């Protein structure tokens, strides 16, 4: 039985898109499984005092420019050339994250794969309910049922619980990964994750 990779995930993070396929490749390499933990990044920021880097580092000369350089290096290394910044970023993903919570754990990967390209390659406006529903239906999901689930008090609470639990474990942003109780933050930790999965 391979190890479990716990992935704290929110669609709003471009780095969540960028790490998804490289992390899947590592999981396949090591016979590990990815357990998606839906969280709401806005809630995590509120609880931790964190902020998006483009805001947090806006007054630090050169820092955001360097972050973009590193992002472009990562994109080139992993062949993620379809990636485009979404013009609606930062967008509110509370409904998407509730849908993700409402799904059975084994269906979350398929849901992510249905939406990541739409958001981070085709620049989907996630507030366009009609288009979002069409993409979900094409991905094999019952869009009407999922939209209804976003108003379920139990689903709302489960998402809040995920956020609080992640923060209690030390998470402050997306993507955060746990393997064997060890925490890794950001797409740049793939090498360390590879080593941990080999241990």
Image (cartoon, rainbow, N blue to C red):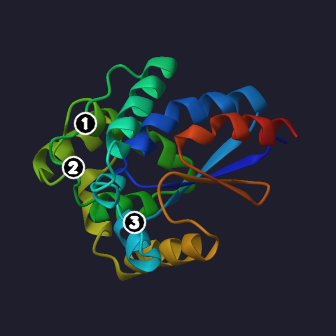
Q: Is residue 81 above or below residue 116?
A: above
Q: Is residue 20 above or below residue 49?
A: above
Looking at the image, how many numbered discs can be counted on the residues? 3
The N terminus is located in which quarter? top right
> Disc 1 versus disc 2: distance between alpha carbons?
8 Å
Q: Which disc, if any, is residue 18?
A: none
Secondary structure at numbered mark 3: loop
At which x and y percent is residue 56? 34, 60
Q: Is residue 167 above or below residue 9?
A: below
Residue indicated by mark 3: 40
Secondary structure at numbered mark 2: loop
Q: Badge 1, how many Cα within 10 Å: few under 14, some, many 20+?
A: few
Looking at the image, do the residues carrying marks 3 and 2 touch, with CB atoms under 8 Å apart? Answer: no
At which x and y percent is residue 140? 35, 39
The C terminus is located in which quarter? top right
Residue indicated by mark 2: 89
Looking at the picture, tell me which residue is in the foreground, 128 or 46: 46
> Disc 1 versus disc 3: distance between alpha carbons?
19 Å
Q: Is residue 114 visible?
A: no
Residue indicated by mark 1: 85
Looking at the picture, tell me which residue is in the foreground, 145 or 16: 16
Of callouts 1 and 3, the N-terminal one: 3
View extreme (front): residue: 61
At which x and y percent is residue 60? 33, 53
């Amino acid at each position: 039985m391979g190890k479990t990779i716990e992935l704290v995930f929110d669609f709003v993070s471009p780095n969540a898109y960028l790490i998804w396929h490289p992390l899947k490749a590592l999981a396949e390499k090591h016979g590990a499984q990815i357990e998606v933990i839906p969280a709401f990044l806005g809630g995590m920021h509120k609880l931790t005092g964190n902020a998006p880097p483009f805001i947090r580092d806006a007054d630090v000369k050169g820092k955001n420019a360097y972050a973009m350089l590193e992002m472009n290096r990562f994109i080139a290394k992993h062949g993620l050339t379809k990636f485009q910044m979404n013009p609606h970023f930062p967008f509110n993903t509370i409904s998407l994250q509730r849908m993700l919570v409402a799904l059975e754990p084994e269906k979350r990967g398929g849901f992510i794969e249905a939406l990541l390209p739409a958001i981070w390659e085709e620049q989907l406006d996630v507030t366009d309910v009609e288009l979002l529903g069409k993409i979900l239906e094409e991905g094999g999901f019952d869009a009407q049922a999922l939209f209804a689930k976003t108003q379920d008090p139990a689903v709302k609470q489960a998402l809040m619980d995920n956020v609080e639990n992640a923060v209690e474990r030390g998470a402050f942003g997306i993507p955060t990964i746990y393997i064997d109780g060890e925490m890794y933050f950001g797409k740049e930790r793939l090498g360390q994750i590879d080593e941990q999965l080999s241990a």
